[in-house]
């Protein structure tokens, strides 16, 4: 009688690719030289690799001086630390960890956190004036912080370290601390704290600073999601209205009345970079604008707010399609550009970094208006409206150089990659204009021309281009081509006249 075929086979028969007899042990396993453990009647195991495989993939190279490979290794060491079963039991029941557990949880030395917070206070506070550095330092030194404050400190330090392009710092246990490790620690502790259900202003600012970090390393999708998360959290807390839905339990948040204004301006600017609609489309309610105007840092954000409100007149139609997209006319574009050019910044009691932020954003918006007119074929060499001519980028480049006059690298560095992209957009449009527009007749051989504006603008932003090789190579090639194609600064007649004057001077020296 024929033996009934089995519907399954043991692992040994599968590996040998032979029929399995179906007995226990099967004939194949019984006849092997080294008797194998037959698995015919054992339940099937999980498919795929039986052990976790670690990969050490480097992130984007645009993160300046950050050592990504070391960050990945440090992150693995953090994830592979022994687990405290009491903590796991507490998390399983939804209870938060005690303050002492949180203080001992992070692997980042507190001395490094204090040092970076002080750098934020010195260089970046004028850009993000929403965190009390002194209060944070005091809590770090006294060990009185809770989990929400610790997450905020880690996110703030990650954003500051990336934005200022700080070199990795030596930590404890022969470990190097960089912005990538700070971000990983923040994300890990944040998930364990159940931050969505325990949302407060500190949690909103954590999302904002994570947006800053990811924008700096050019992870655009993550950056956009984090700023939208911050906007959504701000709306849940009522930061955009006069009715606040939270209780202030800590003093680490500064200028709370301008937190949502900072989020709104940041999302507007980044959405324009990506060419998408911002998530917050309602008109922003300025609570007690007169009181805000008395606050130095709030006044700087109000100036930026006015820029975006003015530009929104055409931005909504730029992102639309169909009949709305065709509604943009030369008159509306010219009107918006004129309104932007009339907006000026009051430099009284304002940090130079905030001043540069305003003027870079303004000239970038004027460039976008001109690009929109160019794409709609509205430009003309005979137009009496300056923005509707082909040489308008020359005017913008000149105005930007005049606005940045007197500002050094220290003033521009805290602005980050967003402002670098805006400067690049202005310089790139100027380079295309110089290259593809025939030069005008120059009466004076030594007269400053568009190519000189381009050269000066390239040198102004060169320190920031060093950390972005792609943008640097594009702008460097165009600047070189523009300088080569420009008319010679010294004509033949001028050279001959200089030679005659030098010979006369030499003869006079011999006589004397």
Image: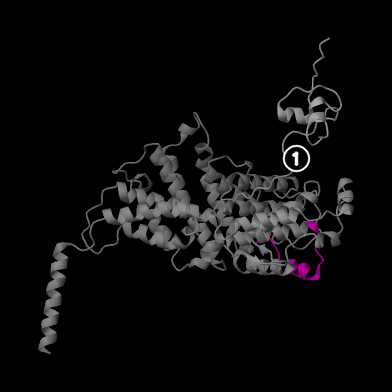
Residue found at the far top of this picture = 1
Residue 202 placement, left or right of 297: right
The magenta stretch spans residue 131: yes
Question: Who's the residue at 58% across and 63% down the image?
Answer: 164
Mark 1: few/some/many CA within 10 Å (<14, 14-19, 20+): few
> Which residue in the rendered view is the most extreme toward the bottom?
512
- Image quadrant containing the N terminus: top right
State how the image is colored: one colour
The total number of labels drawn is 1
Q: Say which quarter of the image contains residue 399.
A: bottom left
Q: Position of residue 467 (x, y in %)?
A: 50, 58
Q: Can residue 190 be seen in this snapshot?
A: yes
**Which x, y percent locates residue 54?**
68, 48
- Left/right placement of residue 201 relative to residue 420 reads right
Viewer-proximal residue among 106 and 144: 106
Horizontal and vertical percent position of residue 367: 43, 49
Query: Does residue 119 belong to the magenta stretch?
Result: no
Q: Could you say where residue 5 lies in the image, as x and y percent from the top left?
A: 80, 16
Compared to residue 351, the image places residue 381 above or below, namely: above
Locate the C terminus and report the quarter of the image it occupies: bottom left
Quarter of image, res 293:
bottom right
Choose between 56 and 166: the one closer to the eye.
56
Secondary structure of the residue carrying tag 1 is loop
Up/down of 373 relative to 453, above or below: above
* The residue stretch that appears in magenta: 128-147
At horizontal 13% and vertical 68% (from top left) the residue drawn is: 496
* Residue with the mark numbered 1: 50
């Amino acid at each position: 009688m024929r033996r009934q075929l089995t519907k399954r086979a043991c692992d040994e028969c599968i590996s040998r690719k032979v029929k399995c007899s179906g007995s226990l042990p099967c004939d194949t396993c019984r006849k092997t030289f080294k008797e194998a453990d037959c698995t015919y009647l054992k339940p099937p195991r999980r498919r795929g690799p039986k052990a976790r495989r670690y990969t050490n993939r480097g992130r984007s190279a645009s993160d300046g001086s950050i050592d990504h490979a070391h960050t990945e290794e440090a992150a693995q060491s953090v994830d592979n630390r022994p687990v405290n079963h009491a903590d796991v039991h507490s998390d399983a029941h939804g209870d938060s960890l005690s303050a002492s557990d949180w203080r001992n949880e992070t692997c980042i030395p507190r001395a490094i956190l204090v040092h970076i917070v002080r750098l934020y206070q010195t260089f970046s506070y004028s850009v993000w004036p929403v965190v009390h550095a002194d209060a944070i330092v005091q809590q770090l030194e006294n060990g009185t912080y809770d989990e929400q404050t610790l997450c905020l400190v880690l996110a703030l330090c990650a954003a500051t370290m990336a934005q200022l392009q700080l070199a990795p710092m030596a930590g404890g246990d022969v470990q190097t601390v960089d912005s990538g490790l700070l971000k990983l620690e923040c994300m890990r502790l944040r998930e364990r704290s159940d931050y969505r259900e325990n949302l407060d202003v500190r949690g909103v600012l954590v999302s904002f600073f994570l947006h800053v970090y990811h924008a700096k390393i050019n992870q655009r999708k993550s950056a956009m999601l984090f700023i939208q998360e911050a906007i959504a959290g701000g709306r849940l807390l009522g930061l955009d209205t006069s009715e606040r839905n939270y209780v202030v339990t800590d003093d680490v948040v500064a200028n709370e009345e301008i937190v949502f204004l900072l989020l709104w301006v940041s999302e507007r600017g980044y959405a324009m970079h990506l060419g998408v609609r911002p998530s917050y489309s309602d008109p922003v309610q300025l609570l007690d604008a007169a009181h805000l105007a008395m606050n130095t840092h709030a006044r700087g954000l109000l100036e930026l707010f006015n820029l975006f409100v003015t530009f929104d007149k055409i931005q909504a139609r730029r992102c639309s399609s169909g009949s709305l997209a065709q509604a943009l006319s030369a008159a509306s574009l010219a009107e918006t550009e004129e309104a932007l050019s009339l907006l000026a910044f009051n430099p009284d009691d304002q940090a130079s970094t905030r001043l540069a932020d305003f003027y870079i954003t303004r000239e970038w918006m004027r460039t976008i208006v001109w690009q929109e007119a160019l794409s709609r074929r509205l430009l003309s060499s005979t137009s009496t409206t300056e923005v509707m001519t082909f040489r308008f980028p020359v005017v913008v480049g000149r105005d930007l150089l005049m606005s940045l006059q007197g500002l050094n690298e220290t003033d521009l560095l805290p602005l980050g990659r967003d402002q670098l992209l805006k400067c690049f957009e202005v310089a790139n449009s100027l380079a295309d204009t110089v290259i593809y527009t025939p030069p005008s007749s120059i009466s004076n051989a030594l007269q400053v021309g568009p190519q000189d504006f381009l050269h000066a603008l390239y040198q102004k932003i060169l320190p920031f281009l060093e950390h972005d090789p792609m943008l640097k190579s594009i702008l460097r090639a165009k600047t070189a081509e523009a300088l080569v194609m420009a008319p010679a600064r010294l004509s033949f007649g001028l050279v001959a006249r200089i030679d005659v004057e030098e010979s006369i001077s030499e003869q006079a020296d011999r006589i004397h």
